[in-house]
Amino acid sequence: MSIADQILYEDNHLIALNKLPGQIVQGDKTGDTPLVEEVKAFLKERDNKPGNVFCGVIHRLDRPVSGVVIFAKTSKALTRMDALVHDRNFHKTYLAVVKNRPPAEEGHLEDYLFRVEKSNKSFVTDDPQKAGAKLAILDYRLKAVSAGGYHLLEVALHTGRHHQIRCQLAHMGCPIKGDLKYGASRSNPDGSISLHAYRLEFEHPVRHEKVVITAPTPWNYFD
């Protein structure tokens, strides 16, 4: 799928894409071309821009996760969007498929997470004073149950910790389908996990209007 086909929203200041599983937002040790560089190249060619093209990363999605990711096309927009994220005025809603039924149809989770760099994995700790521990907050709601026993959860993310949804849902006893790192019984055939950034809501950094961006999932909820 081309970058043009992934665009969900664009104006003079921002561009939002429906990220595919396997795409990386920023460069990492794999050396694979990140999405931010693909967007730069696309804008340069499409708009026939001379010189360098600005494209700022506002937030990230894990490589096996799909869904809405937004970039800033100007430094002014990036600074203002960074402030929205910092002040928690950048609202992200996810869809997650889990095998195990959650303990309640809706719930509020607050956990302290710490990251282990060597394994690139986060863990819940009962000690908020533990080195590196950060408070992680989300709300979830059960939306549907499939005939095969999978459960579709809507997750509202209130903080942005490393692997937060994956870690907190697994700690609750509901690892995400395909997420071997956090306890799923088997992988998805394409290497993805069944976690999708479904919706972004924020105030536009220049026009100060409410913006809501949604992205269709690349998978059937219960495949």
Image: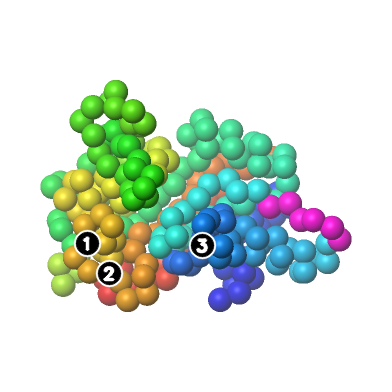
Q: Is residue 220 visible?
A: yes
Label 3 Cα crowd, 10 Å radius (few <14 / some 14-19 / many 20+):
few
Near-viewer residue (187 or 116): 116
Picture coordinates of residue 222, whole percent (x, y): 26, 71
- Residue 112's place in the image compared with 9, above or below, is above
| 180 magenta-colored | no
* In the image: residue 1, left or right of residue 10: left
Callouts 2 and 1 close, C-beta under 8 Å: yes
Q: Which residue is mark 2?
A: 187
Picture coordinates of residue 116, whole percent (x, y): 34, 43
Near-viewer residue (27 or 156): 27
Picture coordinates of residue 81, whole percent (x, y): 61, 40
Which residue is found at the position 22% from the left and 50% from the top? 170
For badge 1, the amino acid type reads: Ala
Picture coordinates of residue 213, whole percent (x, y): 52, 55
Distance of label 1 from label 3 (alpha carbons)? 24 Å
Q: Which residue is mark 3?
A: 30
Q: Which mark is residue 184?
A: 1
Q: Which mark is residue 39?
A: none
* Res 174 quadrant in image: bottom left
Distance of label 2 from label 1 (alpha carbons)? 7 Å
> In the displayed image of the protein, which residue is found farthest to the front?
118
Label 1 Cα crowd, 10 Å radius (few <14 / some 14-19 / many 20+):
some
Which residue is found at the position 23% from the left and 34% from the top? 125
Q: Secondary structure at mark 3?
A: loop
Q: Quadrant of the C terminus?
A: bottom left
Residue range of the region highlighted in magenta in the rendering = 50-55
* In the image: residue 72, left or right of residue 169: right
For badge 3, the amino acid type reads: Thr
